[in-house]
Amino acid sequence: MDRLLNVLAILSLVLILFVLRSLRREHIRAEYSVSWLGAALTLLVLSRTRGVLEWLGKMLGIADPPLALLFIMGCLFLVVFYRFSAVISDLKDSNIALAQKVAMLEFQLRSLNEKQETRPNP
């Protein structure tokens, strides 16, 4: 049981370092890194505080504290993934609206060019 908690603590530290490295190199934006850092810090704290983990296990009806931590970890990551799905959906909608605006501007520009070409030169 202690070995699993130690491995989860190490994995959460690796995740924290990976997110901070990606943030520093500007591979990920700050507002998106907050979710990952929050999830990783929660896992780190829970894997190091056995009493809280045992209490959460009892509240969830899970006898083994590491299994409770794995369940909480799964729930945390589901929340993070849902948040990013919502962000991606908003970005897709914005992309569609932007593409439509560009298409309308191109149409107007072509119309203006055609009018200018058909107008007789003085």
Image (tube, rainbow, N blue to C red):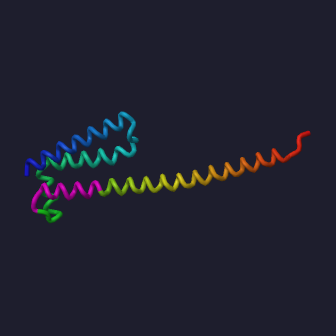
Q: Main secondary structure of the magenta part?
A: helix
Q: What residue lies at 36% left-to-right and 57% top-to-bottom?
A: 82
- In the rendered picture of this protein, how many numbered marks are placed on residues? 0
Give how far across and how far down residue 43 sits, in percent: 21, 49
Q: Is residue 27 left or right of residue 3?
A: right
61 in the magenta segment:
no
Q: What residue lies at 25% left-to-right and 46% top-to-bottom?
A: 40
Q: What residue lies at 36% left-to-right and 37% top-to-bottom?
A: 23
76 in the magenta segment:
yes
* Magenta extent: 63-77
Q: Quadrant of residue 77?
A: bottom left
Residue 10 vs residue 31, the one in the foreground: 10
Give how far across and how far down residue 50 sits, in percent: 11, 50
Q: Quadrant of residue 9?
A: top left
Q: Is residue 82 left or right of residue 104?
A: left
Q: Is residue 5 left or right of residue 118?
A: left
Q: What residue lies at 21% left-to-right and 41% top-to-bottom?
A: 13
Give how far across and how far down residue 60 sits, in percent: 17, 63
Q: Residue pushed farthest top?
A: 25
Give how far across and how far down residue 58 sits, in percent: 13, 62
Q: Residue pushed farthest right?
A: 122
Q: Is residue 49 left or right of residue 91?
A: left
Residue 44 vs residue 81, the one in the foreground: 81
